[in-house]
């Protein structure tokens, strides 16, 4: 008899952005937009900063918000404080909780990440001031519906991403993260803190980058014809962890042997139907979370995609799993991903 799985759902970071009118996109603009996004993804390698970010997310028609401190020092990024803190440097990830520091993945993804311009129509324009800083805004529009789905406001002087706004299928904001106060940005580099070194000695082994998963788990190379598997990991508890991206949005997939323990799930959330049956959906500060069982395996998705888009991903993932006949696919941040803290 398979064990019943209780899945813990974490809370992270995401917040507010102003709507900006972008210029019509051209091929040159798309190239410029990709360059702006790439500069933002690597900003923490070059720049130190500190301040406060505000997270806003839509739940049941109402908005929730939270403010957290954030800093980047010598390439090490810290978000939050106390027992609600995430820290990263390079590909290392560390999460502080009531039981101490836990290790995230510490090895880079090995497969190709698609260009943001592959699936999105990108445009670039002068953006709104964010926390007193002048920005350039990149808007990603769905070429099929001509509706904007994402806006990122990047500091013109340093390239640091200051605000990110996720929009629904009607172009309305549903989730955003952005600086409301900047205490330091740019200038001389500082010595990074030593927390990751201390955490590495006490935390359990980080997820291991692997070339194959245990029998019964699946890792389709692509999902929904746009999301590409870029990392496949095995955690110390036997859970498989996959990472997919379309160049702008990322989806983390966790697979664990056993049926879902519905009684063990956190309160709240809403029912959501996936291909294989009923699932549970949560909107939290860190993103959208979906959990369900399929063929005796519990699956959990975490992403900053809007809920309908993540549900579509879940259905497509199940469909690809069925097509694979239960065998391995060809080839697998969230919180930190949008700011280059992947």
Image (cartoon, rainbow, N blue to C red):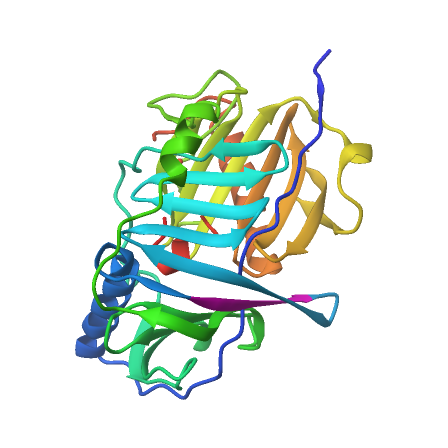
Image height check: is 28 above or below 326?
A: below
Magenta span: helix, strand or loop, mainly?
strand
- Within the magenta stretch, is there residue 311? no
Q: Residue at x 26, y 36 (%)?
A: 110
Residue found at the far top of this picture: 1
Q: Residue at x 43, y 21 (%)?
A: 213
Q: Judge whether residue 172 can be spotted in this image.
A: yes
Q: Residue 250 in the image: x percent, y percent?
A: 43, 51
**Residue 184: image x %, image y %?**
35, 70
Residue that protrudes farthest toward the right in the picture: 263
Q: With respect to residue 171, does 249 lie above or below?
A: above
> Would you identify the image quadrant in which residue 299 lies?
top right
Left/right placement of residue 326 relative to residue 213 reads: right
x%, y% of residue 71? 40, 59
At horizontal 43% and vertical 56% (from top left) the residue drawn is 249
Front residue of this view, candidates 312 and 98: 98
Quarter-of-image position of residue 228: top left
Q: Which quarter shows the N terminus?
A: top right
Using the image as rendered, state which of residue 171 and residue 54 is in the foreground.
54
Residue 55 drawn in magenta: yes
Q: Does any portion of residue 319 appear in the rendered image? A: no
Boundaries of the magenta span: 51-58
Drawn side of residue 96 relative to residue 261, left or right: left
Q: Is residue 285 left or right of residue 79?
A: right
Estimate the x, y position of residue 142 in percent, counting from the top left: 42, 70
Report the number of discs: 0
Q: Is residue 54 above or below residue 13?
A: below
């Amino acid at each position: 008899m398979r064990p019943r799985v209780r899945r813990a759902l974490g809370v992270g970071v995401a917040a507010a952005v102003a709507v900006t009118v972008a210029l019509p996109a051209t091929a040159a603009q798309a190239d410029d937009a990709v360059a702006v996004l790439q500069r933002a993804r690597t900003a923490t390698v070059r720049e130190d900063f500190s301040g406060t970010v505000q997270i806003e997310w839509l739940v049941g028609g109402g908005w929730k918000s939270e403010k957290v401190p954030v800093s980047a020092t010598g390439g090490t990024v810290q978000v939050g404080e106390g027992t609600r803190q995430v820290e990263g440097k390079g590909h290392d990830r560390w999460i502080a909780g009531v039981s101490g520091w836990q290790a995230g993945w510490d090895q880079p993804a090995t497969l190709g990440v698609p260009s943001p311009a592959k699936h999105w129509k990108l445009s670039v324009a002068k953006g709104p001031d964010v926390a007193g800083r002048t920005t350039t805004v990149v808007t990603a529009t769905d070429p099929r519906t001509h509706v904007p789905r994402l806006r990122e406001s990047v500091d013109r002087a340093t390239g640091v991403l200051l605000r990110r706004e996720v929009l629904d299928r009607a172009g309305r904001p549903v989730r955003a993260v952005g600086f409301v106060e900047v205490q330091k940005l740019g200038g001389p580099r500082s010595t990074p803190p030593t927390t990751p070194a201390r955490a590495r000695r006490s935390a359990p082994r980080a997820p291991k980058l692997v070339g194959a998963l245990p029998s019964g788990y699946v890792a389709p190379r692509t999902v929904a014809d746009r999301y590409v598997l870029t990392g496949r990991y095995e955690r110390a508890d036997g859970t498989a962890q996959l990472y997919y991206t379309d160049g702008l949005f990322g989806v983390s997939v966790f697979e664990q042997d056993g049926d879902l323990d519905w009684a063990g799930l956190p309160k709240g959330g809403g029912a959501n139907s996936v291909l294989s049956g009923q699932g549970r959906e949560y909107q939290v500060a860190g993103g959208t979370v979906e959990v369900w069982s399929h063929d005796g395996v519990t699956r959990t998705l975490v992403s900053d995609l809007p809920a309908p888009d993540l549900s579509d991903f879940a259905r497509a993932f199940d469909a690809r799993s069925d097509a694979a006949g239960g065998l391995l696919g060809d080839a697998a941040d969230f919180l930190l991903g949008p700011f280059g803290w992947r």
